[in-house]
Image (spheres, rainbow, N blue to C red):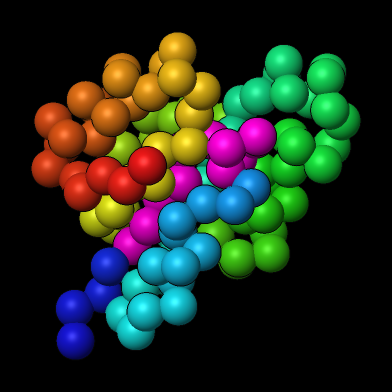
Amino acid sequence: MKRHGIGVIGYGVWGTHSLQEILLRQEGVEMVGVSSHDRWGECQFGDTVAAGRKYAGEKGCAFWEDWEKVVEDPSVDIVSVMTSPVSKLEVVLAALERGKSVVM
């Protein structure tokens, strides 16, 4: 069976209840890495929102502050884009240009 790696970009307000949790229940799907760089969320809501590093640790996967690392990683097949609407287009286009499937 083919393995499908998921990379998550954004683990703040939108990312805490994301589609990747449903996808991870499927056979052959694994978490590769998480990117979260949410200084605004951290200032506004504290560690409960800006918890990307903790989430990556719980999933046993990589953590990157730079979202581009997710779309550049060859082991990532699916990118879960949970960023704010302001940055979503840039992230989605970058993932698609690199041949990744995108979920939002």
Q: Is residue 42 left or right of residue 8?
A: right
**Identity of the residue drawn at 67% across and 54% down:** 55
Q: Quadrant of residue 89?
A: top left
Q: Give the range drawn in magenta.
A: 5-15
Q: In this view, does 90 lie to the left or right of 44?
A: left
Above or below, 85 against 6 in this view is above
Where the C terminus falls, by quadrant?
top left
Q: Percent from the top left, x then y, of residue 23? A: 39, 67
Q: Percent from the top left, x then y, of residue 68? A: 38, 29
Q: How many labels does the image show?
A: 0
Q: Percent from the top left, x then y, of residue 48? A: 82, 42
**Identity of the residue drawn at 33% across and 26% down:** 91
**Residue 61 shows in this picture:** yes
Q: Is residue 7 left or right of residue 63?
A: left
Where the N terminus falls, by quadrant?
bottom left
Q: Percent from the top left, x then y, of residue 95? A: 24, 35
Above or below, 55 against 81 in this view is below
* Residue 91 included in the magenta stretch of the image: no
Of 97 and 44, nearer the camera is 44
* Residue 11 included in the magenta stretch of the image: yes
**Identity of the residue drawn at 28% across and 29% down:** 92
Of 61 and 40, nearer the camera is 40
Q: Is residue 97 left or right of residue 29?
A: left
- Which residue extends farthest right? 46
Above or below, 20 against 2 in this view is above
**Residue 74 shows in this picture:** no
Above or below, 24 against 28 in this view is above
**Identity of the residue drawn at 71% across and 18% down:** 39
